[in-house]
Image: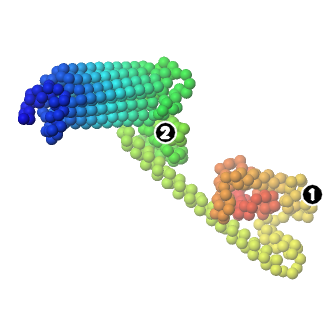
Amino acid sequence: MSPQTNEDYLALLRQGVEVWNAWKAHHPDIRPNLSFATGKGVAIQGAKLSGVDLSRANLSQADLSKADLIGANLSEAYLSEAYLSEADLIGANLTAADLRNADLISANLIGANLNNIYLSGADLTKANLSGADLVGAKLIGAKLSGTNLSGANLSGANLSGAHLVGANLRGTNLKGANCSQANLRGVNLQRCKAFNTDFHQAIFTAACLEDWHINSGTNLAEVICEYVYLQTNQHERCPHQGTFAPGEFTRVFQVPLETVNLTFRNGIDWQAFFAAFQACQVQDGSNILTIQSLENRPDGVLTIRIAIPIDANRLEVEHFLNREYDAQLEVIDKDYRYQLQVKYEQVATYRQQSANLTEILQRLAEKTVNPAQTINVEARRLVEPLTPYPSNQGESVKNCPSGNSAIAPAYTLEQKQRLTDTATKIQKLLQQLDQTYPTNTPLEKQRVVIEVLERIEQNPILKASVVEGLKGVQTEVLKELIDHPLVNVLLAALEEYQKIQ
């Protein structure tokens, strides 16, 4: 006959774990009700208690080690000094249960509900509480060495004086928790949320702080710390050598204001960023933002931490900055494409001029008269309207200074020198770009020419030299001075510099 009341179930349980487990195996669909039962000191190691209702039961000092308590209801149960080492409590409900000084070594509490539980002085060494709900839990002086608390919710929990050496708190929510005087040596706090958390006099030596989140309400006063790691697996030690001076950890990591962290994984356009930053200042009508720090990690990820007033809406500021940054990137991209189009049109104009000159040369080649004499006359007719020759045009080429022999003798010594200097600088620039850019296709050649013009424009000294060098001379002369296949493509664009006064 099956038990009917919780006293009947308790009597069955007192007969021993073998009797209980055998009965449970034959009645898998029955969910025994042991609520309010009194089983103080009962020894039921390895008992099959999954799904059992043990709410408000008195099981203090009971031996439930290795027991199967998956999904069991232990809400408000009294389990102080109970033995639950290696017990399976996955998904169990322990809301407001009293487990003070209980033994939970290596217990499995994945996803368990531990809201407002009493675990002060309990031993949870190497227990697994990943994803567990520990909101408002009391863990004063608890032993949590090597415990897995990744993804657990410990908001509002009291961990003062707790021993968490080597514990895993990756992604754990510690918002508003009391961790004062806790031992966090070697703890993994990666992506941990510690807003308004009290770490007063806590030990942080060798802790991992990669991407942890704190705010101005996070108390780091009198933290004890020799060094920390800014990346997992003990990478990026801080400080790189030696140890923190007393109080230095607090000065380095304490956030004076609420912060917004902007992460750039594929580089940053500083022009777009500062435009977005300024737009945010204007949006709020006052200079409320300050760049607090820049963190450039070895993997190329850049994080900019921006301080804002504690009463500002952090999410709104973050969304505005990201949105404005993307908008500024689009504006810069459009402007760049416009400039590229203008330069492309300039190159197209030169192409047409070059085609016309080629046609003239072809026509001259078909004539039977002296080719050298004819070409000289035609060429002069083409260039004379652009740049008249000086009166000393009969001067011999051999009288030109060394290095200027390719320059037409019509120019003064000063003009020749300036033109030679300009040609040398452009030649050097073209050779530098040869190392970076391919020039196999017409489009690639155009890109190199555009890059030359960009660099001239970006270098005021070089631009002034080019403008000065081309005063009163023909750009055609550069053909003889610059030994590069792209010199012809450059000519039309360089003529624009002769218009600069």
N-terminal-most mark, 2 or 1: 2
Disc 2 from disc 1: Cα separation = 64 Å
Find residue 373 and report its image quarter.
Answer: bottom right
- Residue plotted at (65% across, 50% down): 458
Q: Residue at x 88, y 79 (%)?
A: 369
Other residues around mark 1 within 10 Å, as few (<14) / some (14–19) / many (≥20): few
Vertical position of residue 65 compared to residue 362: above or below: above
Spot occupied by residue 81 in the image (x, y as percentages of width and height)? 24, 20
**Residue 1, position in %: x, y?**
7, 35
| Foreground pick, 75 / 462 | 75
Classify 354 as above or below 59. below
- Residue 471 is left or right of residue 154, and the answer is right
Residue nearest the observer in this picture, 164 or 12 = 12
Give the numbered dot on residue 303: 2
Query: What is the secondary structure assignment of the residue under circle 1?
Result: helix
Q: Quadrant of the C terminus?
A: bottom right
In the image, 92 versus 398, the foreground residue is 92
Give x and y (percent) for residue 150: 36, 34
Q: Quadrant of residue 60?
A: top left
Image point (51%, 47%), residue name: 266
The residue carrying mark 1 is 399
Amino acid type assigned to the residue bearing label 2 in the image: Thr
Colour theme: rainbow
Q: Is residue 499 visible?
A: no
Residue situated furthest top in the rendering: 246
